[in-house]
Amino acid sequence: MDIRSVLQGVSQGIALIGVAIIAWGVVKATVATVRVEITALRRHHLPASRLLLRQQLGSSLLLGLEFLIAADVIRTVLQPTLQEIAVLGGIVAVRTVIGYFLHKEMADDRRVLAEARRNAQTGDGER
């Protein structure tokens, strides 16, 4: 067994971990969303719960993307042609942009949640 086949296996394993993290996050978010929406159907207004769900799903997506980028880097080390490097650069750029905007959205959601908690504690918020 040579180093190339070992690294290929490592790369595939890391990619599978990334996909599993994303899939698990989606499954958890789907189940939680159904619960929240059932509660909302009972005439409870739950914007904070929905924001929390977005935070959890966004976190899973970001972590999964990091694993997928790591797998792509290892894969490119195995075949360092200009084409492979260009493809990796494109993939990393797209995933970085997605990660940036997900992170930005999550930060905005955290601010909204913190404000909702402050309002709930002072009695100024909706109930």
Image (tube, grey):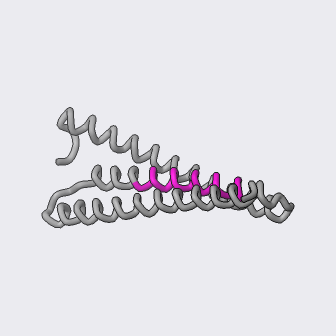
**Split into 4 quadrants, where in the image is the N terminus?**
bottom right
Quarter of the image where one finds residue 81 = bottom right
Residue lying at 52% horizontally and 47% vertically, measured from the top left:
104
**Who is closer to the viewer here, 123 or 42?**
42
Name the residue located 69 percent from the left edge and 55 percent from the top edge. 7
Overall secondary structure of the magenta section: helix
> Could you say which quadrant of the image residue 84 lies in?
bottom right
57 with respect to 117 (left or right): right
Q: Report whether 11 appears left or right of 29.
A: right
Check the image and name the residue furthest to the left: 42
Q: Residue at x 63, y 55 (%)?
A: 10
Q: Measuring from the top left, give residue 52's x and y in whole percent.
A: 33, 50
User: Which residue of the protein is positioned furthest toward the top in this rendering?
Assistant: 122
The residue nearer to you, when weighing 15 against 57, is: 15
User: In the visual, does 54 lie left or right of 127?
Assistant: right
Q: Nearer the viewer, residue 42 or 76?
A: 76
* Residue at x 70% of width, y 54% of height: 74
Residue 58 painted magenta: yes
Residue 113, percent across and down? Answer: 33, 43
Magenta segment range?
A: 57-75
